[in-house]
Every structure is written in structure tokens, then in C-alpha cells.
Image: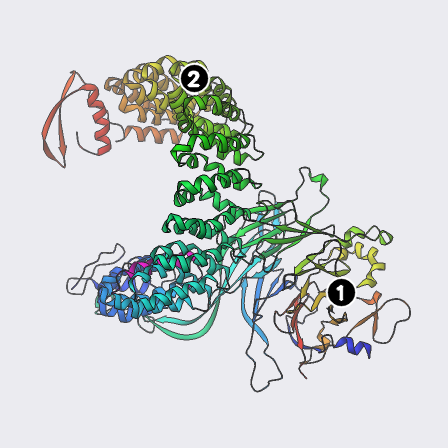
Amino acid sequence: LAANKAARGNDFQWCFSQVKGAIDEDVAEADIISTVEFNYSGELLATGDKGGRVVIFQHEQESKNRPQLRGEYNVYSTFQSHEPEFDYLKSLEIEEKINKIRWLPQQNSAHFLLSTNDKTIKLWKISERDKRAEGYNLKDEEGRLRDPFRISSLRVPVLMPMDLMVEASPRRIFANAHTYHINSISVNSDHETYLSADDLRINLWHLEITDRSFNIVDIKPANMEELTEVITAAECHPHQCNVFVYSSSKGTIRLCDMRAAALCDRHSKFFEEPEDPSSRSFFSEIISSISDVKFSHSGRYMMTRDYLSVKVWDLNMENRPVETYQVHEYLRSKLCSLYENDCIFDKFECCWNGSDSAIMTGSYNNFFRMFDRNTRRDITLEASRESSKPRATLKPRKVSTGGKRKKDEISVDSLDFNKKILHTAWHPKENVIAVAATNNLYIFQDKIN
Amino acid sequence: ARHSITLSTSKMAGADGDDSLYPIAVLIDELRNEDVQLRLNSIKKLSTIALALGVERTRTELLPFLTDTIYDEDEVLLALAEQLGNFTMLVGGPEYVHCLLPPLESLATVEETVVRDKAVESLRKISQEHSPVDLEVHFEPLVKRLASGDWFTSRTSACGLFSVCYPRVSSTVKAEIRQHFRTLCSDDTPMVRRAAASKLGEFAKVLELDYVKSDIISLFTALASDEQDSVRLLAVEACVSIATLLPQEDLETLVMPTLRQAAEDKSWRVRYMVADKFSELQKAVGPEITKNDLVPAFQNLLKDCEAEVRAAAANKVKEFCENLPEDSREQIIMTHILPCVKELVSDTNQHVKSALASVIMGLSTILGKDNTVEHLLPLFLAQLKDECPEVRLNIISNLDCVNEVIGIRQLSQSLLPAIVELAEDAKWRVRLAIIEYMPLLAGQLGVEFFDEKLNTLCMAWLIDHVYAIREAATCNLMKLVEKFGAEWAQNTIVPKVLGMANDPNYLHRMTTLFCINALSEACGQDITTKQMLPVVLKMSNDQVANVRFNVAKSLQKIGPVLDSNALQSEVKPVLEKLATDTDMDVKYFAQEAISGKLVFPPPAAETSLYVRFYRSGKPDDHAVFLSSSTVLSLIAFVVHADVLL
């Protein structure tokens, strides 16, 4: 009964809606989804993959015949955002993998997004065209050339309706500003600037200027041997245009105020939870590294994800998080083998729901976790083909933590560490979530009873 | 009426066909060619298309088509937006100018700022061609539509249109326009508030003074305390125009509280803006407020915690001091500004120091000789020793100001080490910068000082390992010769330059040639023929082909300066020999020099020649007697001008 209640999460049940991507067992590397992001209205959902492609899904209007079925997300536009490149000066291959996608607030009927790989950020415009010009002077309707000597009158082309065509065009390319790998991009609430962060530096760009950016944070030590920490993620505050945060591999978060100085090397707030000396181990520093930081929509809180937990911080309290949620505490005893297979370095992301009342983040074995901040209830769900019947309710999963394994429980040892859910996104207004499981994108929504 | 248009790409039709239609047909079809260059080309000739179509078809067919072409590339849209601003006559004159509004309206909503701005510019332009009635019937509704558009792109465009229609509409419509502007000033998106803030000053200018006081001031105050830094800083700009509009007695209550607040804003970008606009603000608020308010504010900006702000303020030091009221200028500078300036000289940030160095010399003219010697000179000397080369360069580049007041001698002892150090800086761009100031320094320091101290430097640059430096050094020598004369050149630099012709490094030998190219004209025929030419000719036997073909190029270059005997008897054989060189480049340049580019006149037996000019084969009326050296320079001229001799 308790499990059943937990499964209901926010007093509703999650059910399967759609799955995108091939069913084949052998997955092409290029098809692995590397980022998922809803736009501000939730009408569009973008994914990026390791092959440098961006796929945008559009929410279809609800059908009147089947009101219980809310509209589905269908492919709206697909384009190649980045190509593999080679840096001849450094003899380095630059992967085409899309690290992050960020939508811009909508400014006219077209949609704009930023996509980035390790080095280059691009601004894309996705627009619709539903008219075509017709009528030539030098050609007739069938395309045959007319005799140029017999043109007796001029024809002005006329625009005729045509089938809707969606075009994606690159508008700006922001290149050559990052020596290290870009891990984050974030659009500022002033709608004219955005920041991009790599391992050691954060740059501030104007969306219309590509040949210049301002370096606002630089933690590169003069001597690289003294390097002890790297920047792992950065994000702008959703409302205060002067505030941004960045997280580090040491598990700390720095909040900077761009009003104070042009260079933000000195932070104005420093969020850090004192380490519990009793649990100190060889892996302490690795697992405390923050893989993602996200402001709540309200701007009051921020959430950080480290290897084993998600923490919610109140921006007004720097010495400890206000909430801590264990994502997969049962892995603590497995850290040694997770270190050996490199899983310990996986970068899990996390996200808020539209009202900031719940949070979601991924785990292994295609499990993902949700935490209700009001009721403190948590739930483990699985993105799998087996429960992918239309409107099938998702059954909660449970991992046995020592002792006797109960029925329906999965033992830690049988978890598949190759199936990891790193990227998830929550619709900004509704209970619709997108979960990337390797090359498949699952969309779940709440069940309307 | 038929208009004939010629297109280079088009075939002209026979006499019986309509020979003007084909090129137009091509242009129209190319409006949607796949090649963006062709589309752009067609759009740029839109007036030609419109002319051919006539006003009626332009209005009913061409403009509706253009209204929907907003899918195109930015550069095409930009060109279109610009064209439409000059289209009034092509649609039938002012009576029909409103037909241009739909395409410009759709261009004013695209996401690309440059296109939108151009569309707004064109709309502003054609608004003047609307009759007052049309303005209210057609133009003003468009402004309203844009102002209440769903997307912020259209609302930002509206901000730029209020001021052009406001003066020409009825008072009811005026009230509506004011209301729209107010709404946009508190728009949800910062983009629109920024657009409104940046047009606030312009809008204030066309408003009646009462409304400026009631409406504009409250909007100004609100924008100046906006939550977004980027909006607040634009309010500073508006402050200048608003302050200019208001009578002096209202400034204190209406503008100054906001300005004071901006000067102490939490965000350095806003304070930067205040510093950057300081001279304008100073002029707008007048001498009294300047004395009471702006002087302390300026002191604070000079001491700001953010280097960007200090640098912006430092840049304004001279202008601010110049514009201080004359009666108290010296006192204010000496007691309030100079102490801050002194601190800035040893600022921790090099941008601040270099900003200050670029204006500080200007203070000497304002303060006069005694103050300069006592107070400024120590600062100049300190800056000449600054660790940052840019600071030193900025001081050196502004020496002329101080020269006028106290003479450069006072500085010369400190100047020299500074120059020497810059001349040997590890960064070649720094060396390049100081070379460029050499002619100026030479002029101010005089020939004696130059020969004694700086000449060696100038010669050392000729063998710098960076080509850009060697090139600049060559050019520098030419300017020095222009300044000090041919005789000076013959005694001081020519021997050294020619000496390098025997250098084991071929790059240095080539530098000799480059120097000769640059100097021959300034040195004149005598030096060139007697001293330089033999060296050049000798170098035609150089073992390095690069040197040999540069000999050919040099001979071509100095040919006009040489006397004709030398050309005929010495240059010509050498070039002919080079023309048979084994190296193909040497051959090429030798032939270039011989063929056409350099004319060998017949040996001049007489000391004067009777020269007749022919233009286009017709004998000219003027005939003149010229000396043989003039003839030679004329030959050069004639060759260039492609006129027969």
C-alpha cells in the first residue's frame, strides 16, 4: 500500500505516452541522446545527440475525439547542428556531440535555440514557411524556357499557399572563445546576453555579437599543477540579470553578482555543506563533485546534483542545503567497482517541475527518481519498452538495500550500469516529462482519471 | 514611358522586340533566385523594376509580394528595408506613400536587429511624406499595431516611431501616443523597456514641456530604477536630453535625484555609463550643478572600486576640466581633481593608467606653465617610467600638448630612456607603435637631439627580425628625410643604409633596397643617381634571387628620379641582363620594369627640350620649355597618366 501511495507521487500516477528512437539492441554511438530541453511554453521539446543532430518535437493539438489522450510530441524539425572538426593547431579532434541546448525566450513567430558542442556555440532559428512564390518571366508553368525575344509583358511573382515547411537556419556562430570543454550555456534574463562555461572559465556573450565575449570567471592557476578544482556547471538566475552561479568539482557552488565588478573571480556567496568526517573515504571528493546546478523557476532556490544525492539550497543560506534527497544511496558500498568502470564520473542532470514542488533526476538501470518537496515522498520509475503500452501506468521500482530481497525488488547487483538516465526534462507548465535513455526518448505524463 | 536599362549580363533584344523588358524580366525572376547574391542584386535594383512596372503595378503586385518575403536572408531584407525608404515616387508620390507601410511593417518585426532598425529608419523617413490626414489614417494605426504586437520585436520597433508622428497629429491622438509609450516603458520584456529607454530622450524632445515634466520624468525615474542593469544604464543617456529640455530651476528636483542615484548605482555598468556620458551630462546640467554635484560625483567615479569605471572616468578628465566654469576652474582642478589624478597614476589596473595617460597631457594647457611644472611634470615623468608600455606610449604620443606649454626639454631626459625601452620591447606591436611616433618626436626634439640619441634606434629597427618593424622603419626614414632634408639624409642615414647592402643576411640586403625605394624621391636625383644607383646595380649580381628581383622592382621604382643618361646607360643594360636571368621571378620583374612601366627616353643632348603634349591624338595648344630634370619627372607622370609624349 505504501508503495502504491508513493507511486502516486503528486496525487497522480505517471503513465506512458510515447517513446522515440530505434528499438534495436545495438545502439549506434551517434544516436545516443546527450541533452533534452523543453522550450519556455513547453510546446517544443529539443534533443541533441552524440552525432551532432538536434531533433525538435512539437506538441500536437489535443484531439477532440479522444479527450483523455493529450496531444503527442511529433517531430517538427531535425537538423545537423555540429559536425566533427579537427583543431590543427592542437592536433585535437573536436567531437560533434551536443553538450547542451538552451531555448531563447520567443521573440517572434520563429523559435531560437543555442546548441553547443565542446568548443562552438551556435544560434539556430527554427521557422515555418507556408507560402511559395509562383510565376516566372523567363519560364512557363512547366519550367520550359520562354523565348527571351518574345517577352511582351512583365509578371510579378504571386505568393501561393503550400504545405507547411519547417526550416532550421544557423544565425550566429560563437566560436574560438573556449580553450577547454564547454559544459554549460545559460541565457540571461535580460534577453540579450548568455554565459558559457568550460572547465576553467566562464564567458559572457551578447547574443548578437559573435566576435567578442567577456571572460567573467577564470579559475585557471598560473601553474596548472596547482589545479585542484574545475567548473562543472553554471547557470544564470531566472529573474535577476546580474546573478549567476557555478558549481565545482569540490562540491561547492559560488554565486556571483555581475554588478559588483566586471570580473567575477570573487564570488559574493559560497555554498558549501561541511563534510561529515565519519563518512570520509577515498571517493569522497569524486562523489561530492556537482554534475548539475539548476535555479528553481521562482529564483529562490537552486538544486545541485552530486553522484549520490540531490540537494536544494535556499539562496539565502550558504552553510547547508535546506533539503537533501538520496538518489541511490545503495551504491555507496559499490563505489569501488563504479570507480573501476568509470561510472562514478557520470554526470547526472536534474530538473524542477513547473511549480518547483517536485524534482527529478536520473539513475542507473534506466531508473529515474522523483521527489515531492512538500510530502517528502519519493518514487523510482523505469523507462523501459516493457511498460510502453499506450497509457500504461508506470509501476514504481524498488532496489533492495541489504537483507532479504522482497518480491518485486531488484538487487543492487543486478542493476545494469550501462543503462543510465543522465538527461531529463520537465514540461514548464504541465506534468509531462521527457527522459533520455541512451538512444530512446521517453515521454510520460500524468494520468487523468 | 519606356526606360531603357542596360545590364551587363543581359542580351539585348532585336530592334523589333521590346528591348527593355528582358533585363527587367531577369531582375524580377532573380528576386527569388537560389543564389543570395543574385537576389540581393535584384533587390538593390528594385527601383528599376518598379519604374518598369509603373506605379500602379508596383502598388498592386510588387509591394504585396515584397510584404511576404520576410523569409529571406538578413542582407536581402536589409537592402529591401533600405530601398523602401526611397520608394515614395515609385508608388505614385506622397498620395500613395502609405502603400509602403505593409512591407515595412513586416520587416519591423523580424528578429534581426539591423533589419528592424533599418525598417524603422525607412518608416521614419516616409512618415515625413505622409499628409497630416494620412498620418492619422495610415501611419499612426501602424504604430499602434506595432506597439501592441504579440512579440517584443514589433513593440521595440514601435518605440522608434512615436517621436516622428507625435508633432503632426491631433491632441487626442497625441494622448494615445503618450499612453502607448507609457505602456511600453513598463513592458514585461527587458528588450522593450530597453528600446523605450533608449528613445526616451528623443520622445521627450517632441513633447510639450508640461508633458515632459509630468509624463517623461516619471517614466525616466521608473526606468532609472528598473531591476535590469541594462535598462537603468540607458536611462543615463536619456538624462542628458531631458536635462537639456528642462529649465534650470527644475533640474534640481526633477533630474538630479535620479542622476545622483545612477552615479552611485550598485551596478558598475550603470556607473560606467555615467562616467562615459560625463561631459554631456556636465553640459546639460550647467555650471552651478556641476560645481555642487558633479565635481564630487566625478571624484567618486575616479575612485570607483571597479577598474572599468575608473578608466571611463579617467578618459574624461581633460574634457571635464576644460568645461568647468572659468571662474573656479583652476581651484576645482587643483583641490578636487588633481589629487584623484595623482592616485590614478599609480593605479593597479593598466587600462586605467593608460586611459589617464592618453588625456593627462591635455591638462597642461588648462593649468598653465607653473602648475604644469610643479604638479603635472612629476606625473608625466612617473608615467614615462610605467611598467606598462601602453601608458608610456600614450604619454609620448601626446607630447605636443606639453611642448606648447613648457617646451619638451624639461621632459627630454626622462623621455629618452622611455623611448629606448619601448624601442627594444619584446612585443613587436609595441616597437611598431613607437616607430610611428618617431617623426613626431623628431620634429619636437630637433635634429641635434635626434642625431645624438635616436638615430641609432632608427637604424637598429632596420634589422629587426620582424618584417612589419623593418617595413615601418623604412617608412619612418622617409618621413625623417622629409622633415630634416636631403642633406641630412646624405650625411646620416644614406651611408648606413647603403652599408647594409654588403650584409651577409639577404633580408638585410633587401632592406637596403626597400629603403632606397622609399628614400629616392625625398633625397632627390643627385643622391639617388650618384650614391644609391651604383649600389642597386651592384646588387643585381646577388646570389639570392629574391634580392635580384627586388633590384628589378627598385629600378622601376627609382627610375623616375634618375637622370636620363643613367637610365639609358646603366639601368637599361642591367634590366636586360636580369630579363635573361635563370630565375623566372627575376625575369618577370625585369620584364615588367622594361616593358611600358619604365620609359627610356632618347639620350638628352640638349639641356632643355621642347615638349608638346598630345591628348587623344590632338595637339595641345600649350607648349612649354622645360629643364631636362623636369622632363624626367614629367615622363614619369606621363607614363602613369597614359598620355603620349
At x 42%, y 41%, the residue is: B288
Q: Is residue B220 left or right of residue A421?
A: left
Q: Nearer the viewer, residue A171 or B6?
A: A171
Residue B536: say if magenta.
no
Q: Nearer the viewer, residue B159 or A327?
A: B159
Residue B169 screen position, x and y as percent: 30, 65
* Residue A364 tag number: 1
Q: Using the image, determine if residue B245 lies above or below residue B549.
A: below
Q: Amino acid at mark 2?
A: Arg
Q: Nearer the viewer, residue B481 or B534?
A: B481
Q: Chain of mark 2?
A: B
Numbered disc total: 2
On-image quarter of the N terminus of chain A: bottom right
The region drawn magenta spans B109-131
Residue B125: say if magenta.
yes
Q: Label 1 crowding class (10 Å Cα cut-off): few <14, some 14-19, many 20+?
A: some
Does dot 1 land on a helix, a strand or a loop? loop
Same subunit: marks 2 and 1: no
Q: Is residue A98 visible?
A: no
Q: Chain of mark 1?
A: A
Residue A262 screen position, x and y as percent: 57, 45
At x 25%, y 58%, the residue is: B10
Question: Which is the main secondary structure of the residues drawn in magenta?
Answer: helix
User: How much space separates mark 2 and mark 1, taking CA atoms?
Assistant: 79 Å
Residue B43 screen position, x and y as percent: 32, 59
Q: Is residue B404 left or right of residue A332?
A: left
At x 31%, y 31%, the residue is: B592
* Residue B409 tag number: 2
